[in-house]
Image: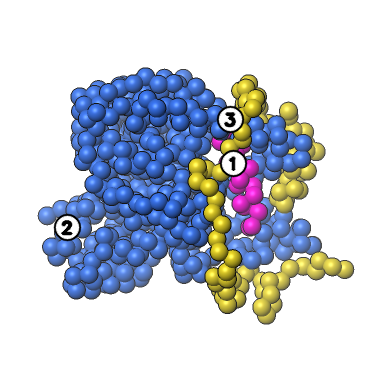
């Protein structure tokens, strides 16, 4: 029988239904694995054994009564950006202190409605700002993968680095994540797992700590395309509490995974062949094209001419929204407080003590680009370029049904290899950031290993609200790639 | 456009972030590095392009004008770092 921590979600669901394993056994196996490995991997900021075991006991009761939901007894990690009622929520920042939300985010409440078991809160870059998980106030996360013959600690990517590392190291069967510029897809690629950022508006943002509201979107990470589909089916759906939530029916994503790609037109954007692209990733991209062609798809060369402006556009829009969203952390209503001579001094000292360096940088950039005299030159200009980036995609959908690109320009890099140059770090998101600006769905699927044994991902982009085609293409790549490699740091079988 | 020290100090004050004098040169260099890189956007011809606000294509909805919650005073106050009775307390604002 499969070890409890090696199950897919689909497999665990079947085993639970057949009563081959109980939800309590499944939760306990994961909690034991977390106790053994988390001190090293640091994928969880907070582990919640009491919550998990109580939920597992309720799951076992439901299973015995034949009242199981779609996720009954499935142990998950929750990115610590989702508010969980009564459980400390940190956003990986010091500024929230011991904040315990009195409410549950819509996404996590839907997972609980469907029977999921929450193991704990996963680590991330502070306020989801970063691509390496190194900006967490609770310490970095270790990527469970190692280069062959080299024990150097690699980063798991970010910002959902704890979610991706937990799933890769078998410390959860799946996890919630969020993606503002690539924060689901880049860590999924670095950790050899699957992640999807759905269309903007598909998942409610209610109860998710806001970073950049017009770009933030929740999505799942898991070890298979089907598992991501199962999780997204639970997470997605209209929510009146989020004014940007899309009032649309949620299709059966899991049913789309096996659909195949016969007859689909797959766009290959020439602007994604960027300078600095690793030759191995370029080769994998070409392999992915050949796979899809062999499966019956047609390849179409397309142009997305404003691609190279996506990163600088993002680094105006996102900090502008962040500077506004993060104004609420003022040391008065929740979180930490540093006493001051007067109210302004209290605000300034509390915020200086609570926020880390990258968060401060983005708040300052955002405040500057929104300030009088600069608003039109920076912020309005960026919104106009954003409209052109979206138009590039709108025009492409006339010729193609989905787009294939690499997920990241390189494999996971070392913790000590990180450049001090913030702009160099931002380049990690060069392939993923366009999807956030255009509001379209994007998935990262592991498709191979580099010469040093590290996983590499391919990205599939789709039309707004056509996640089904993204799942179909991702499912086809997964089947043909046959990616079965596992990281060296993982729960013992 | 490049920031001088006085501008960094002013922006930090607008953002309600205390910045020590010793941090200013480093911040100034970092912010100018980022802004210099962002400058490439000026090369894009955006004449007549409607700025894109928001992330979705959907129209924002209006909801019914009706009270949907309330009576949760203790929950609202539960995470306050300092409170007096049913109020958040702050240093004296009005002399």
Q: Nearer the viewer, residue A40 or A56?
A: A56
Is A368 placed above or below A111 here?
above
Q: What is the chain letter for disc 1?
A: B
Which residue is found at the position 31% from the left and 69% from the top?
A: A55
- Of all residues, the one furthest to the right in this rendering is B95
Chain depicted in blue: A
Q: Find disc 3 in the rendering and name its residue.
A: A385
Which residue is found at the position 25% from the left and 43% from the top?
A: A256
- What span is colored magenta in the figure? A312-329
Task: State yes or no: residue A324 in magenta.
Answer: yes
Chain depicted in yellow: B
Say what secondary structure mark 3 lies in. helix
Q: What is the chain letter for disc 3?
A: A
Residue A318 place in picture, x, y as percent: 58, 41
Task: State yes or no: residue A445 in magenta.
Answer: no
In which quadrant of the rendered view does residue A53 lie? Answer: bottom left
**Mark 3 Cα-neighbour bin, 10 Å: few <14, some 14–19, many ≥20:** many
Q: Find disc 2 in the rendering and name its residue.
A: A14
Marked residue nearer the N-terminal end (3 or 2): 2
Labels 3 and 1 share a subunit: no
Q: Find disc 1 in the rendering and name its residue.
A: B53
In which quadrant of the rendered view does residue A35 lie? Answer: bottom left
Q: Which mark is residue A161?
A: none
Q: Nearer the viewer, residue B73 or A393?
A: A393
Is A195 placed above or below A386 here?
below
Residue A347 place in picture, x, y as percent: 71, 58
Q: CA distance from mark 3 to mark 1?
A: 11 Å
Is residue A375 among the parts visible in the rendering? yes
């Amino acid at each position: 029988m499969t070890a409890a921590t090696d199950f897919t979600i689909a497999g665990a669901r079947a085993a639970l239904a057949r009563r081959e394993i109980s939800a309590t056994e499944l939760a306990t196996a994961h909690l034991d694995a977390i106790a053994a490995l988390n001190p090293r991997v640091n994928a969880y900021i907070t582990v919640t054994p009491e919550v998990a075991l109580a939920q597992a006991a309720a799951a076992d009761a439901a299973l015995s009564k034949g009242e199981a939901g779609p996720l009954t007894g499935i142990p998950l990690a929750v990115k610590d950006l989702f508010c969980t009622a009564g459980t400390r929520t940190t956003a990986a920042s010091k500024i929230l202190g011991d904040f315990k939300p009195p409410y549950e985010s819509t996404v996590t409440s839907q997972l609980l409605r469907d029977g999921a078991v929450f193991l704990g809160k996963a680590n991330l870059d502070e306020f989801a700002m970063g691509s390496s998980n190194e900006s967490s106030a609770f310490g970095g996360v270790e990527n469970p993968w190692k280069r062959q013959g080299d024990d150097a600690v690699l980063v798991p990517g970010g910002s959902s680095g704890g979610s991706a590392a937990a799933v890769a190291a078998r410390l959860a069967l799946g996890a919630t994540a969020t993606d503002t510029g690539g924060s689901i897809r880049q860590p999924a690629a670095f950790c050899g797992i699957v992640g999807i950022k759905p269309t903007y508006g598909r998942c409610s943002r209610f109860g998710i700590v806001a970073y950049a509201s017009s770009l933030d979107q929740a999505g799942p990470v898991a070890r298979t395309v089907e598992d991501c589909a199962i999780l997204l089916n639970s997470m997605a759906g209209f929510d009146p509490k989020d004014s940007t939530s899309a009032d649309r029916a949620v299709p059966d994503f899991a049913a789309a995974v096996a659909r195949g790609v016969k007859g689909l037109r797959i766009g290959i954007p020439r602007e994604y062949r960027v300078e600095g692209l690793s030759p191995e990733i370029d080769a994998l991209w070409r392999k992915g094209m050949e796979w899809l062609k062999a499966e019956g798809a047609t390849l179409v060369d397309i142009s997305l001419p404003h691609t190279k402006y996506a990163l600088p556009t993002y680094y105006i829009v996102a900090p502008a929204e962040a500077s506004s969203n993060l104004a609420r952390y003022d040391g008065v209503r929740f979180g930490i407080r540093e006493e001051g001579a007067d109210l302004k001094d209290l605000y300034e000292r509390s915020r200086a003590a609570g926020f880390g360096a990258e968060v401060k940088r983005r708040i300052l950039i955002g405040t500057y680009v929104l300030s009088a005299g600069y608003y039109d030159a920076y912020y309005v200009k960026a919104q106009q370029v954003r409209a052109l980036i979206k138009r590039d995609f709108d025009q492409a959908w006339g010729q193609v049904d989905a787009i294939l690109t690499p997920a990241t320009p390189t494999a996971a890099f070392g913790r000590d290899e990180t450049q001090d140059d913030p702009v160099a770090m931002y380049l990690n998101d060069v392939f993923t950031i366009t999807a956030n600006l255009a509001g379209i769905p994007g998935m990262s699927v592991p498709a191979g290993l580099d010469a040093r044994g590290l996983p590499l991902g391919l990205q599939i982009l789709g039309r707004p609200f056509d996640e089904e085609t993204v799942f179909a293409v991702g499912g086809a790549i997964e089947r043909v790639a046959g990616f079965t490699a596992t990281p060296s740091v993982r729960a013992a079988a | 456009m490049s920031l001088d020290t006085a501008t960094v100090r002013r922006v930090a004050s607008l953002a309600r972030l205390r910045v020590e004098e010793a941090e200013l040169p480093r911040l100034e260099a970092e912010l100018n590095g980022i802004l210099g890189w962002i400058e490439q956007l000026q090369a894009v011809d955006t004449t007549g392009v409607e700025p894109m606000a928001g992330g979705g294509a959907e129209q924002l909805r209006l909801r019914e004008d009706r009270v949907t919650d309330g009576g949760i005073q203790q929950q609202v106050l539960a995470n306050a770092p300092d409170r007096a009775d049913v109020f958040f307390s702050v240093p004296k604002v009005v002399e």
